[in-house]
Image (cartoon, grey):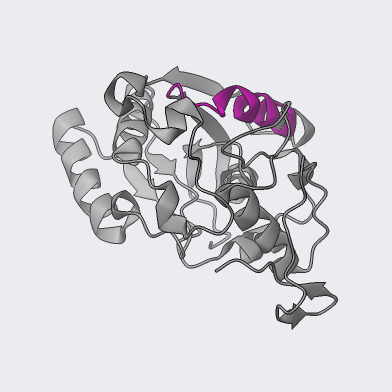
Amino acid sequence: MADRYLGDDAAVMVGGGVDSAVLAVDMLKRYRQVHPIYVRCGLRWEEHELAALEKYLNAAARPGLMPLCVLSEPIADVYGDHWSTTGSTVPGGETPDSAVYLPGRNLLLVGKAAIWCRLREIPELALGSLASNPFPDSTPEFYRVFEMALERALASKIRLSRPYETLHKADVIRRGSDLPLWLTFSCLKPVDGVHCGRCNKCAERHRGFVEAEFEDRTHYATKPEVCPTSKVSGRHRVPCIE
């Protein structure tokens, strides 16, 4: 991400995780004011994710980081008995990234947030998508076409930027090493309000900290396993998850 000042206002799509949390602060290098936007869809983990996000933003507060905007875009009536709404058969730590694909979710989230930006004349909406993102609604082609559709529908240019599109999670963790990353939240099946340690997102999170050689201060109900025969990076062993 180029640290080049561009203008007054931008918005950032935020969840509870590391990537968007770091990006929300990072964007202040380019804009005077950054508006974090969270879209509530009715998924099982959102209550804990949103609570963690609010704590993080309070702890990371600085001039120009605006109050969190929470929008609603209910999806349960479309998803039905999907694992994201029921909490059953949640993809475990051994599953590939593609296992946690939520069909059309980015289409709904970005569309809703873009309308919010249009009505407030905010020209850029940033997303924390990484190089490893495998989903069809996160590709460069999708964002290029969707940006064109939004411009036609809204009669206004809304730039959909992905400043971290060439980075991996370990890169983002290093970039945000001075931020309270332990307050972020990335779990599909929380246990008593903390990370379960067993789901796909907990495994991805822990792997990122290990690969970044950065202490993982996350509170896990069950700490993600580290394979005793895994490749060692520095003083840390990479979790036995492909």
Q: Main secondary structure of the magenta part?
A: helix
In this rendering, the answer to whether 73 lies above or below 199 is above
Q: Quadrant of the C terminus?
A: bottom right
User: Is residue 178 inside the magenta stretch?
Assistant: no
In the rendering, at what x and y percent does residue 220 appear?
Answer: 77, 43
Residue 68 seen? yes
In the figure, residue 184 lies in which quadrant?
Answer: top right
In the rendering, at what x and y percent does residue 63 appear?
Answer: 70, 33
The answer to whether residue 20 is left or right of residue 218 is left
The answer to whether residue 111 is left or right of residue 207 is left
Instruction: Name the residue located 24 percent from the left edge and 59 percent from the top edge.
Output: 141
* Residue at the extreme front: 89
Q: Which residues are magenta?
A: 41-56
Residue 189 vs residue 161, the one in the foreground: 189
In the rendering, at what x and y percent does residue 211 appear?
Answer: 70, 69
The answer to whether residue 155 is left or right of residue 99 is left
Residue 156 vs residue 200, the one in the foreground: 200
In the rendering, at what x and y percent does residue 160 appear?
Answer: 35, 46
Residue 74 vs residue 159, the one in the foreground: 74
In the figure, residue 33 lies in which quadrant?
Answer: top right
Instruction: Name the residue located 30 percent from the left edge and 41 percent from the top edge.
Output: 103
Residue 45 vs residue 67, the one in the foreground: 45
